[in-house]
Amino acid sequence: MKIAALLGVFLAATAHAQVQGTPFGFAAGTTGGGDAKAAAPSSLQELVGWLSDDVPRVILIDREWNFLGTEGTTKGKCCSTKTTTCEGGTSKGQAWIQDKCDDGTWIDCEYDNAPKKAIDIGSNKSIVGVGNKGVIRGKGLRITNGNKNVIIQNIHFTDLNPQYVWGGDAITLTGADQVWIDHNKFSLIGRQHIVSGWQPAGHVTISNNEFDGRTEWSAGCNGKHYWTLLLIGEKDYYTFAGNWVHDVSGRAPHMGTTKTNSENFFHGVNNYFQNIGGHSFDVDANTWMLLEGNVWEGVDTPITDTTLKSGAVIYNVPNTQAGRGCESAISRSCEVNQLVKSGQFSPRTDADVLKKAGTYKASMPPTTPVADIPKNVMANAGVGKLK
Ligand SMILES: *[C@@H]1O[C@H](CO)[C@@H](O)[C@H](O)[C@H]1NC(C)=O
């Protein structure tokens, strides 16, 4: 009995030090490091080695790993434009780290080098925060060169030169596939919280994350971060579910591009977009987008006008009739979206979205009633929420 009880405690402890839950939607089947023995690195160097080698690993992030200062700083010139100097706004703007400054003036600046260059992640990795302790400060992760099968769960990414546009991206997908980004938090990022392009991001599920845009350095001069999610890979399939996107001012998300032969299918389901002083969805051509069961609350522009004219193919489930329209394609009705103290958007029920959704039926997870979304998402999204 005693041994069995001890074994039970031991198994429970190890289970909690692993990935929790299973990826659903487009990243279903992603296994990351699989059954590899979970281990926590003991130095920054070991962490980087484990992240980037080609050994399947379950890497525990059991503390804050701080990369700031590890690669020196750059003192130089940054470009100041009208989004750098906020007059009468609630925050400072963001200066641009870039080589040209045609539409602004050069100013002195100093930034940390570490956030500017992400760590390239090898295939077959699970990177998992322990409890609420997993923090990566001053560094982003990138999946590229055909690497794939990566799980990033329960980690707070923060402090990537938030004063500067081009200060750093938290997660980059370009030439990737099978990526599950779950229960993470993003804050104080210089550029994008998640970015894909120009190569394929592949099959990606972005679930239960908190995108926290509160910042002193806002390009919109309103205390809210502008560059949230830029999804412009060449062949991308996203399930974007249960995320809390708040206090941002733009690109939440931006997707689609006409600069490549991009083809982007986006299923945005049961997310909570809150306090967006600017726009949420800004979508270009070559995108097929099904939005259902989402709540926008306190959002100026849930979907931009340019989106509706861009050629993007959209099904935004404006009413129950449109919800029932999903049945023949995906064998269930779609959940209606809800706008609370927000701008309006035009109803769109483009049949081509359902046609594609029908072929991806196995990747369409069930939905939660939209009325439960704000409460559920705020209780569940972000770090330290895994049970
Ligand atoms: C990743 O795992 C797959 C499936 O087990 C295997 O075929 C592949 O070689 C692995 N890749 C690396 C770099 O270990």
Image (spheres, helix red, strand yellow):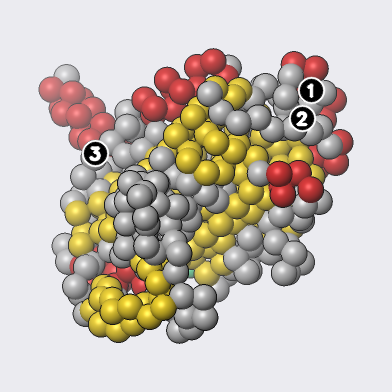
Q: Is mark 2 within 8 Å of ligand 1?
A: no
Look at label 2 and name its amino acid.
Pro
Q: Earlier in the sequence, mark 1 or mark 3?
A: 3
Q: Is residue 123 visible?
A: no
Residue position marked by numbered label 3 in the rendering: 131
The quadrant in which residue 111 appears is bottom left
Residue position marked by numbered label 2 in the rendering: 347
Q: CA distance from mark 1 to mark 2?
A: 9 Å
Q: Is residue 321 visible?
A: yes
Q: What residue appears at the point 50 percent right and 27 percent down from the top-left corner?
A: 297
* Quadrant containing the N terminus in the rendered view: top left
Q: CA distance from mark 1 to mark 3?
A: 41 Å
Residue position marked by numbered label 1 in the rendering: 322
Q: CA distance from mark 2 to mark 3?
A: 42 Å
- The percent coordinates of residue 251 (x first, y second) are 55, 51
* Quadrant containing the C terminus in the rendered view: top left
Residue closest to the eye, 8 or 310: 310
